[in-house]
Image (spheres, rainbow, N blue to C red):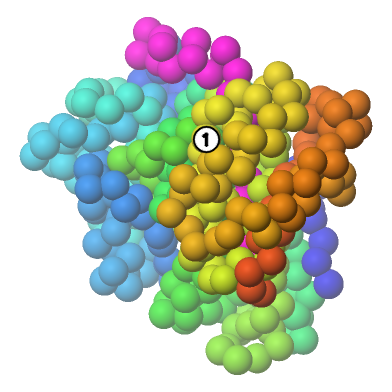
Amino acid sequence: MFQFIENGTVTSVQGFKAAGMHCGIKKRKKDLALIYSDVPCNAAGTFTLNKVKAAPILISKKIIENKNKVNAILVNSGNANACTGERGHNDALTLQDYCAAKLGVKPEEVLVSSTGVIGQLLPVEVILEGINKITGSLSCSGGKDAAEAILTTDLRLKSYALKIKLTSGEITIGGICKGSGMIMPNMATMLAFLTTDADIDQPLLQELLLSSVNKTFNKITVDGDTSTNDMVILLANGISGNSIQKDTDDYNLFLDGLNIISEEMAKSIIADGEGATKLIKVTINNAKTILDADTIAKSIANSPLVKTAFNGADANWGRIISAAGKSGADFNPLKTNIFFDDLPVILAGYKIVIDEEKASEILNKDNFSISLDLNEGDCSTTWWTCDFSKEYIKINANYRT
């Protein structure tokens, strides 16, 4: 029913082309990406909740809110075009207009996105020349180049595609994303672009994306910071001819598939967190409310003391229960059980049952889970985070240099 496509990307989907290249924003690495559909798409999007929003966020958000058809997404890395005022906004519009003209579409049919250093003006002439080249380089095999071109401090390419067998036929979802630091729910320094050949009306597409983002991209954190440029975009071109309608089996199948690929993309961002050596799953079970569960999970996942302890494989459960306690969520610590993977650490009443040797073995793995059973209700949540290493400080102490 669900099948991952090996080395899949946005161009694994019918009707989509892409390209990525070095245009000169960065010294050497690819820094300009373009995703294009042969036919107009319905488009959905979610955007950063940071009050400081970059120019491309404001432009693309308006396009989504107006329910415009979309043919392309133009993305640059190395420069966020954030906190650049009217000049930055006009620069983004200039690039949007020029790209649209080169593609033969309307400006409002081109979404724009940027990521990189805040507070610097875009090198417009350099990017315009890049647009001249990249619009002629679009291909069905260009997805990986596009995935590479959107990266900043990322160390790994992040691209996926998933085939879904619906009752009416087969459709595909493809995606690329970037993100490594400044990662926190309600978007982060994260860009994610998804494509599908399913036929989905815009309001329903927006509903599906919001549902999936809230379960996946909004439950990851590297460092608790929310950026100025973050967006998740989903384009549906309908080329498969398979339509998704509300409250049908195919709706549920599509949403399940969207959750699967979005979760993989979200986890790939955390696994590639700046300086990260470990991917950590944080699960809260049996909370009174979902809000309580999410509040506790976020507090634990963001705690520098918890994250540094995990970097050193130190089974310091006191930091975990303390992070839960300071979260503001409603729970009784005396009822709480804590586990590393399936290993009990403390049981209700602060009964310490930890096997330090086995705990150390778990925490030395590059992928493990911690879970808290609150014994308060029937609500649960799962988040993903990573450890903090010295490398995180090194990367961010020298980000602009």
Give the total number of marks visible in the rendering.
Answer: 1
Residue 394 vertical placement versus 317 (above, below) = above
Q: Is residue 284 left or right of residue 338?
A: left
Quarter-of-image position of residue 15: bottom right
Q: Is 214 a magenta residue?
A: no
Residue 202 x, y percent position in the rendering: 42, 77
| Closest to the observer, 79 or 338 | 338
Residue 96 in view here: no
For label 1, the SS is loop
Q: Is residue 378 left or right of residue 365?
A: left
In the picture as drawn, the residue positioned furthest to the bottom comes out as 247
Find the magenta span and give its range: 380-401
Q: Going by the image, does 323 lie left or right of 314?
A: left
Query: Is 99 positioned to the left or the right of 291 in the image?
Result: left
Q: In which quarter of the image is residue 81?
A: top left
Q: Where is residue 208 in the image (x, y as percent from the top left)?
A: 53, 73
Q: Does the magenta stretch include residue 397?
A: yes
Q: Is residue 64 above or below residue 148?
A: below
Question: What residue is disc 1 on?
Answer: 303
Q: Residue at x 33, y 24 (%)?
A: 117
Looking at the picture, does residue 165 appear above or below residue 338?
below
Name the residue at the left extreme: 86
| Residue that appears at 53% across and 19% down | 392
Q: Quadrant of the C terminus?
A: top left
Q: Mark 1 belongs to which amino acid?
A: Ser
